[in-house]
Amino acid sequence: MASRWLAGCVLLLSCILGFVVPSPPTYQTYYFDQKIDHFGFYEDSTFKQRYLVSDTHWRKPGGPILFYTGNEGDIALFSNNTGFMWDIAEEFGAMLVFAEHRYYGESLPFGNLSYSDPKYLNYLTSEQALADFALLIRFLKERSEARDSAVIAIGGSYGGMLAAWMRMKYPHVVVGALAASAPIWQFEELVPCNLYYQIVTNDFKKSGPGCAESINKTWSALNRMFESDEGIRWLSGTFRLCAPLKSQDDAAGFKNWLSETWVNLAMVDYPYPADFLMPLPAWPIKEVCKYLRNPNLDDKQLLQNLFQAINVYYNYTGNTQCLNTSQTAVGSLDDLGWSYQACTEMVMPFCSDGITDMFEPQTWNFEAFSDDCYKQWGIRPRPKWITSVYGGKNIHAASNIIFSNGDLDPWSAGGVKQSLSDSLVAILIADGAHHLDLRSNDPNDPKSVIEARALEVAYMKKWIKQHSQQVNGI
């Protein structure tokens, strides 16, 4: 159970942009031959990495390159939804490049066999992905018009982690990085494992009286319903489930589904309607909390209200005929690939206590998690590897990285929220959900994100100017 519980949390943490660009951006699609293994010599095969380019506003020669470090999904999804980059392209005279992460979208090292056996997944690591990006940038800069171009890495969530790590590991390749909602410290014991769920809970507490308290009481109500066949049938009917619950063995999966729903809502709690994970209204948690005002109802009344609340997330349009408990998001996000990554190097501890948060108590049990990973993939996680290779909190030697985090975003728990130096800058966004700053400009944007974007633009212009001075020997 621990593995399923954690994998669900991690999946929708690492990839969500959640906004719509006013009109589809125009780009060209290209493919670059990458080595399957950059760090060994026996496996000498290559695969085609997909990348997207928009040079409509590129001022060549020497105009900057804004390089999106793709995360766990089809790169077209991120290109179509990273509105901030498109909004500033003309101002910067920039070429936009969106690089697809290996093993996602069309960039499959072993084609259709890539996920058929764990032996083919051995090259699905962040280190290999960063090397892909470095070599792709080198290829792009071999063009005479781009030889002197400053390259800035930009990414959100896992993509933001990659952007930060790109600057740390390849400072000669990218002059700086914007790492939005990047939980680079959500490893080992760098941050408390329960902080993530405390932030989700605070979002619900702020959005309506009695809301978090009601959700907290639903767990025991659900446990009581699962004690009888009649209760299980009642739940299946009340929640209009596509696949009816069959036994008490389904309780953990059903409750995990609900937990992921609350987390997703916290991440996409935007101040205007959005359509990425699901079609949602503005400030969706406030809409949810309208149905969860009284935590003192009896079990059936409380759970009937719970169904109305989750309908805001799963059926806001009214077009959904039944609820699918195996799915918490719609889109081109790849839970299978991320599940493997979470079972290898992306080992992020999470826990809850049911007291400081609204979730069922759940301890972090690495041994149980490791056993589940072994059953699924035949491999064991390495919980200390990420901090060993990327430094954990010992990153003061790095430079030119912006870490932006919104206070509504649970992933800010593992983010850098205090500036570490003049060039390792933390930007906090009040009333900001999961990398709100990477979304397109919107009339309903809070002042905090407008100011954050302006500051990010100022820092990136500074890096570009410094690079230009170095190139010209000034």
Image (cartoon, rainbow, N blue to C red):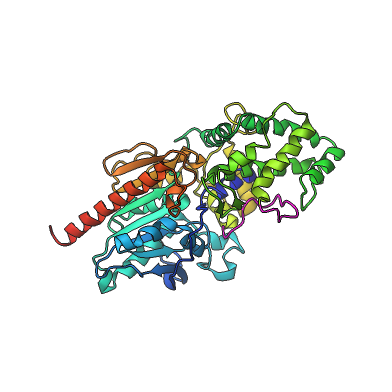
Residue 308 visible in the current orientation: yes
Check the image and name the residue furthest to the right: 230
Task: Tell me if 78 is positioned left or right of 97 in this view.
Answer: right
Q: Residue at x 42, y 63 (%)?
A: 98
Q: Which of the pair 304/165 is nearer the observer? A: 304
Does the magenta segment cover residue 192? no
Q: Residue 434's x, y, as percent? A: 49, 46
Does the magenta segment cover residue 327? yes
Quadrant of the rendered image containing residue 203: top right
Q: Which of the pair 157/267 is nearer the observer? A: 267
Say if 206 sits above or below 400 in the image: above
Residue range of the region highlighted in magenta in the rendering: 317-333
Residue 1 visible in the current orientation: no
Q: Residue 87's x, y, as percent? A: 39, 58
Q: Residue at x 50, y 48 (%)?
A: 346
Q: Residue at x 43, y 68 (%)?
A: 52
Task: Tell me if 124 is positioned left or right of 211 in this view.
Answer: left
Q: Residue 454's x, y, as percent? A: 33, 48
Q: Residue at x 80, y 35 (%)?
A: 225
